[in-house]
Amino acid sequence: MLKRISLLLILAACWGNTHAAAAWVDDSIYVPVRATPSPGGRIVHRGIKSGTRIEFFGFDGDWAKIQYGDIEGYIGKQYLSQSPTAAILLERARSESEAAKAEAAKLRTQLAEIKGERDALSEQSKSLKDTLSSRSDELEQLQEVASDPIRLDQANRRLNEELSLLRSELDQVKAENVMLRSSNRYREWLTGLAILAAGLVIGLIMRSRSGRRRTGGWAN
């Protein structure tokens, strides 16, 4: 870090006022790890870059005890932060933004596909409705065509039922006529016998009277 700042200062001095330009101090620093909590302690790691995640075990004065991988030691507590640095947060934000953009693009693609499917289904639904309407019209026509035979069949059934009733009545009338004819003949026989019997009785009466008259005439 100090080397970079020195280099920038040297360049600025060389350019002078006539060649001044904008510059920034690099925010990447490298913190050395010492074996003991003192500025003169032996350096066990030349420098951990800012933003590196380490294990923290507590403070010892102005020093923080840490562990980086297999290395344990101390760094100045001014270099320690128990929250991610701005660079890390910015990188995370960038990553999240990129992920959000990718997810948004994916969702847009899915939305377009769903809209396409919706439009296709809408077309299919319209086609099915048209087909259903056409089939309904055909069904009505078939019902109209089939209604005449059905009506004729119903009329034929009614006529057959009426014919059956008429036949039954005719048979009943015929039977009654036969009975009446038999009854009339019986009455005719009875009448004839009654007339014959009456004739015989009258004949006997007439003969009896005639015999009496003759007997009385002889007696005179």
Image (cartoon, rainbow, N blue to C red):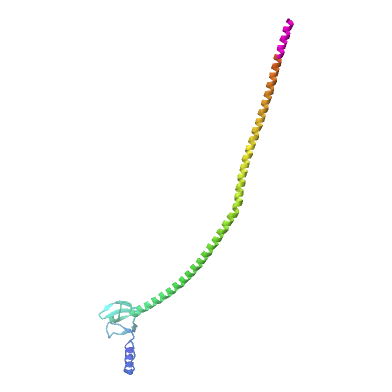
Query: Magenta segment: does it hold 166?
Result: no
Asked if one can make out residue 69 in the rendered structure from this viewpoint, the answer is no
- 181 and 82: which one is in front? 181
* Residue placed most toward the observer, 136 or 208: 208
* Residue at figure coordinates x 56%, y 59% from the top left: 137
Count of number-bearing discs: 0
Q: Quadrant of residue 172?
A: top right
Q: Is residue 140 left or right of residue 77?
A: right
Identify the residue at image location x=70%, y=17%: 200
Residue that extends furthest to the left in the rendered view of this protein: 61
Q: Which residues are magenta?
A: 206-220
Q: Position of residue 114 (x, y in %)?
A: 47, 69
Relative to 139, residue 161 above or below: above
Q: Closer to the camera, 132 or 205? A: 205
Q: Position of residue 73 (x, y in %)?
A: 31, 81
| Residue drawn at x 69%, y 25% as measured from the top left | 189
- Residue nearest the observer in this picture, 25 or 47: 25
Magenta stretch holds residue 213: yes
